[in-house]
Amino acid sequence: MILPFFLSIGCMFPSEYENLYDQKSSAGLFLSAFFYSTPFACSANSNTKSIGSVDQVLLQCNRELANLDTNYLAEANQNVFSNISFAKLDSDRLLVKFDPLTDDGRYELVLAGVVSNSGETLANDKLPIIIDTKLPTVSLVGYIPITDYTFFSPRYWDFTSSEPLANFSPPILSGSLAQSVVLRSVQKINETTYRVYFETNFTTNSPGSLTLQFMNSKDNASNVVSNSITIRFIGLVQGPKLNHGRSEFDAFQNANGDVVAIYGSTSSAEILRKGSSSFTLTNPSLPESLRGERGVMLDGKNLLITGGIQSATAYARTTSYIFDTDTATFTPTGNMNGPRHLHNIVKLADGKVIILGGIRDFAPTIPAYFTSLNTAELYDPETGIFTEVTNRMMTARSFSCSVLLDDGRVFIIGGTDGIYAPKDSTEFFDPTTQTFSWGPTLPVPVAALKCMKLADGNVLIYGAQLSNLNNSTMLYDRTRNQIFTIANSKFRREWSIASELPDGGILFYGGAYRYNTSEPNRTIEKLDYAKSNNFFDMGLAKYSVSKHSGVKFSDGTLFFLGGELGGMFHLETEYYGLSNSN
């Protein structure tokens, strides 16, 4: 009696349903429920989520499968899966193969046309496949691997992930500086950018490191962030003592990486050989000079020293000589055409040297007076001869500053022709025509200043001692041929030393409130150049110095030497870098 009842029910289905067991029809749903407790379904047992390339999916079905139209199935999926094929394995398993997927995302495998042996089609004929071919990584936005304590100045870090994350937690900190950093909160900026707020309490300016691990941060496939970030921080390290205290002097570096400290109110030179832990005093002594001599490295080893003034004399010297930094010996070379000290000296692109302005004489009477020069001379290392430039400078200048520009011209900045009269003018020297021409006007008159060509070709103007007590740090923009005040330092920095750091910032070390006082500055500042252009407090140096010197090693380490401390000559040195190795 049961069979006729079944047949009578079957006759009740509308004729447009070709398959009585189609679960999308009411009759199919009824019959499926009548014969089976669960609908017809096929699920993936492997490879629906994979780290790496996915190239096959094995489907396990809860019914025996009819013979399948594999060509139809392949065509239905070809727009998403390349070279896809379907094969029936055993009676209830289906193997799907395709070219590996390389892009992360959610894909759907179309299974329309898969039919059970009883004629049922799948209740859900689209199977989702999550492809996860990449492990998430995190990087720190806007910072380079080697940086300094200005890294912390905004009091937050921005991190970016290689893909959206399900959760991002504050990183776990380790390393020598970990105890000085406290993480506070995390803010989600967008799907892949997160901001971490923190507090710092640094008790030292020594070099250190900080490692950040992301053990509690995962992507949408529950993969833990795979990388960590280690940042090495620049700091101060005590260096070897000088044999002689030196003030208002220049230090030089030869091709070997040796550091030469020469003159500075003492007629001697001493050398710190690369890898050595102490300075070696040269012998014999150098020609006597009280101050104002100027030098420039001619090549990898030879240093040209020009002019200067001797004690108890009113006139500067014309004598010049070559100091061999390898053998620590000096050899007289040609004399300048006129006496001068406190002049500018610049090596030109062709290897010759230009001598600019300076002071001819000096009378330490009350009131003191001196004669500034508007003359220039060219030194040829090949002949050892100085030749006076026929054309004169646009104005007499002493206590000025000069730098070689990328285009081969020399930029001459500020200075004075009277001890209390700093200039606001600049000029250019063109070596090709050996002529001078006016440059842009300074926003602040300055003399006894420092200048430095930066990596981008612009010129930093700073450390002026005759500037009407102005804190301005200026920049010559070569593309606009203009000078503007880029920022005001927090502290007066007469006779400070500025140096570029690996992250593009500029460090200011030492300097005094006024030229002839014992008020040097111990605070280190950094100019966030070409970014915020703000000054940041970088902590304290060990000593308060002014009238010192410095060099920069090839690895970016800075080395500061000598100067004055409390009106006394200073013997100490400090490295600012990753270590005390030069």
Image (tube, rainbow, N blue to C red):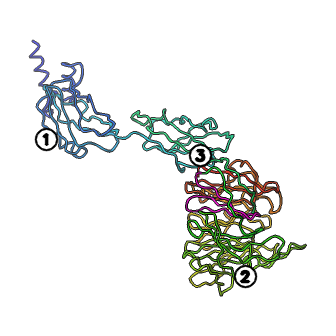
Q: Pick whichever of labels 3 and 2 is earlier in the sequence.
A: 3
Q: Distance of mark 1 from mark 2, alpha carbons?
A: 98 Å
Q: Residues within 10 Å of mark 1 (few under 14, many from 20)?
A: few
Q: Residue furthest front?
A: 284
**Residue 264 belongs to magenta span:** yes
Q: Residue at x 69, y 52 (%)?
A: 573
Amino acid type of the residue that numbered disc 1 sits on in the rendered structure: Asn
Q: Which residues are magenta?
A: 249-275
Residue 567 pos. (x, y %) = 82, 57
Residue annotated with mark 3: 233
Q: Dot 2 lies on which element?
A: loop
Vertical comparison of 30 with 560: above or below: above
Viewer-proximal residue among 561 and 124: 561
Residue annotated with mark 1: 71
Q: Dot 3 lies on which element?
A: strand
Answer left or right for 194 relative to 305: left
